[in-house]
Image (spheres, rainbow, N blue to C red):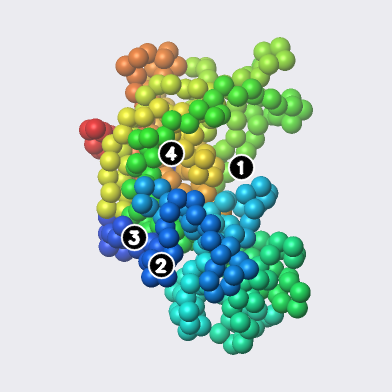
Amino acid sequence: MFPFRSIGVAVMLCVGSLACAQQGTSSGHLGLLRRQLEMRKVALVTDSSLHLKSCPQKEMYVLMDKNELKKAGLKLFPVEMEKVFHPAVYDFIERTFLHLSLLQMKSQREVLLRQDQLSLSVNGLNYKDCSVDFCSILNALDLKYPFSLTADSTRYQASWQGVGMKVDLLFPKQYDLLLGYDKYELTQRLITNLSIRHQTDFRNAPVKWEESSLQKIRGNVFYDRGDVFMIPQMKSGTYLMKSGTAWSYLFNAYFPEESVLNLFSHAHQMNFLLPFSLAVKGYNSSAAKSIGLADFVSLMISEGCRPYVGIETMDSKQITGTVIYLNRDLMYEHLLYFQLPLEVFHKKDNVRIKAVLYPYIPLNNLENLYADESPSAVVQSADFSY
């Protein structure tokens, strides 16, 4: 058993308020960049690659999807480059330098840097105090020179050490800035992705573990220990069963809570096909979806989120609890309250897991508070009409 009290997230309570929601459909970073590209009469065509007029040595790219600007930036990082952090961090760097290069006046670049809480320095001097031509700065952004990307708890620092020029860009760990969309847009995109995503890449993948690295629970049941988030009961990891030399994910009525941790962490690899009723609540948005749990978990993992599962209650009929899908690189979490009937272990066709999802909660506003409502109360009050 995992003793557990429900986690309340203070920022979740402002869902729907003006402080948390942004109503624009193009007010994010990508929307602003698109307007700059249109002002400079850059052709917005699918997969275009052009040289910058202001700095011909540098190439830019534009990726469109059904008349929507999906990505754009300077070509700084090769596709095959090993990326230590979430790909969106590298996309943001490329997008930011393209945006700065499209602005014709230094004062305009200073405004953009200030608005996005960015710090650009050249040879240790703040950009506003240096007299270096901006094209020269861009030419120093080349991987033939030493490059580093580091992070602390609140910000990233990208650094290039060129010939006679060191360039540093500091920027916040702020998911809407890094992803290029405002909070409202991100929620709408998530709701859409819940409808269309059917990920199969990871399903039925062979399970390989070394027994010496696992914690033995009982008999042939082992635990690949993860870590915890906020409180010890919110845990990650994997429960495994060994049969001969073969390993499989634990899904067994004799280990219901351990099996639940597996489901919300590895359903896409377990090929778990039972239906999943999901109510989404966030940023002036609400929706109800019926999807496969495997598809949902796959979507969370593909975003770069790490699952942490905590059990609130278990009785003879059901288990209730909370899952936090945490993205540390982009500093947000998706908060899921679930209600899981124990009949899932018998795989009856009419069994349905129910859950309520609060997406894109910023970690820098997170407080360890206890909610007035339990996960079970949240789920029971949700509207699952779809």
- Give the residue displayed 50% in from the left and 37% down from the top: 309
Q: Nearer the viewer, residue 64 or 303?
A: 64
Check residue 227 in the rendering and tell me which mark sits there, or answer none: 1
Residue at numbered disc 3: 26
Tell me if mark 2 has few (under 14), some (14-19) or many (20+) residues whose alpha carbon lies within 10 angstroms of its own: few
Residue at numbered disc 2: 41
Q: In this view, does 221 lie above or below 7?
A: above
C-alpha span from label 3 to label 2: 18 Å
C-alpha span from label 3 to label 1: 38 Å
Asked whether disc 4 touches disc 3, contact meaning CB atoms under 8 Å apart, the reply is no
Q: In this view, does 319 lie above or below 245?
A: below
- Give the residue displayed 64% in from the left and 22% down from the top: 206
Check residue 113 in the rendering and tell me which mark sits there, or answer none: none
Give the label, 2 or 4, closer to the camera.
Answer: 2
Q: Residue 131's spot in the image, x, y percent?
A: 61, 87
Give the label, 1 or 2, closer to the camera.
Answer: 2
Circle nearer the N terminus (1, 4): 1
SS under mark 2: loop
C-alpha span from label 2 to label 4: 49 Å
Circle nearer the N terminus (3, 2): 3
Residue at numbered disc 4: 322
Circle nearer the N terminus (3, 1): 3
Circle nearer the N terminus (2, 4): 2
Give the label, 3 or 1, closer to the camera.
Answer: 3
Q: What residue type is labelled 4?
A: Thr
C-alpha span from label 1 to label 4: 16 Å
